[in-house]
Amino acid sequence: MEVLEILREASNRIYKNVKDLAGTNDAAGDFGVGAGGDISRNIDIVAEKTVLDYLKEINFECIVLGEECGRVELSKNPKGFVIMDAIDGSANAVRGVPFFCSSLAFATENKLSSITDGVITNLSNGEMYWASKNKGAFYNNKQIKVHKKDPIYKIVGINTSGSSIELMNKLHPIFENYNHTRHFGANALEMAMFARGLMDIFIDLRNKIRIQDIAAGYVIVKEAGGMLLDANLNPLDTDLSYETRVSFIAAANQEILDEIMSQINS
Ligand code: IPD
Ligand code: CA
């Protein structure tokens, strides 16, 4: 079975197991602080267990890097890493806000740039985004590309959750000069929507996002033709460690990147 098919099947199983749980009291159950540093909620645990059970069932030889469960070695001869954020947008999922997803990626080495496959599933409706290196990015079987044309409405995605006053001051000109800034609360799904052409740029300069939140988005954005850069505007790459935190900019083209960067106060 191809890696992509394994990730797709795992995502389908998550959807099946959590779709009726979101927004219920049962979703919120507190399991203490997970490997990624946030409280693990029951819905996170159910979703992670679904993936781990499936990977064990098919004897997939890998190391899982889960946001809650941490590093789980499923084989002594791993083919690579499954980078798992079984629920991205946990706060939305617990409250029942219909914007949360699963994000599963496969990497052959301990770095983002070795990711070969990624799948993001919108868990409020089962819609799936996926990509494999050099094979394009897809949304429900249709190939997707970032938005290259001049849009009718320019949509600027910015994650500002928990931003410092310094960062808000830096970003302030964007909020002043653009009427359509957006922040939905699940980074992976926002990267997928950007890849599909629904936003022109998506920025997260908080230096807070974990590898699990961006791994699948990394390959989907790149395969959809998007630029993916770090805060110094170099190609985004990093190791897969639990300590690593990232800032990034996903831009549809050089023009929108230059335009938005010129707005950011130094
Ligand atoms: C969170 C979401 C959110 C971002 C947070 C992440 P989680 O992921 O991606 O959009 O603002 O920084 O922690 O915790 O729900 O998997
Ligand atoms: Ca999560």
Image (cartoon, rainbow, N blue to C red):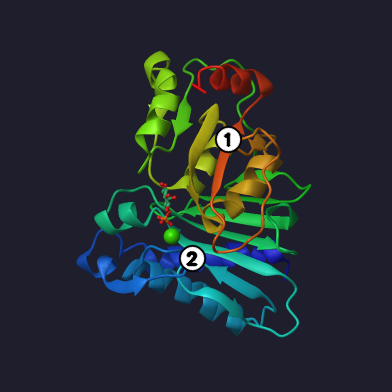
Q: Amino acid at mark 1?
A: Ile
The answer to whether residue 180 is above or below residue 54 is above
SS label for mark 2: loop
Q: Quadrant of residue 73?
A: bottom right
SS label for mark 1: strand
Point out residue 13 in the picture as x, y percentages from the top left corner. 49, 69
User: Viewed as shown, does residue 109 lie left or right of 21?
Assistant: right
The answer to whether residue 76 is above or below residue 201 is below
The answer to whether residue 39 is above or below residue 223 is below
Of labels 1 and 2, earlier in sequence is: 2
Point out residue 243 in the picture as x, y percentages from the top left corner. 54, 61
Residue 67, labelled with which disc?
2
Residue sitting nearer the eye, 24 or 63: 63
Q: Quadrant of residue 256?
A: top right
Q: Residue at x 51, y 39 (%)?
A: 193
User: Viewed as shown, does residue 153 lie left or right of 211?
Assistant: left
* Res 200 visible: yes
Q: Quick check: which quadrant has ligand 2?
A: bottom left
Q: CA distance from mark 1 to mark 2?
A: 22 Å
Residue sitting nearer the eye, 14 or 244: 244
**Quadrant (top left, top right, bottom left, bottom right) of the N terminus:** bottom right
Instruction: Determine whether label 1 and label 2 are within 8 Å by CB.
Output: no
Point out residue 20 in the picture as x, y percentages from the top left corner. 31, 64
Q: Residue at x 67, y 48 (%)?
A: 219
Q: Amino acid at mark 2?
A: Glu
Task: List the residue tagged with mark 1.
Answer: 249
Q: Is mark 2 within 8 Å of ligand 2?
A: yes
Q: Quadrant of residue 224?
A: top right
Point out residue 71 in the picture as x, y percentages from the top left corner. 57, 74
Q: Residue at x 56, y 51 (%)?
A: 214
Q: Residue at x 39, y 22 (%)?
A: 172
* Res 141 visible: no
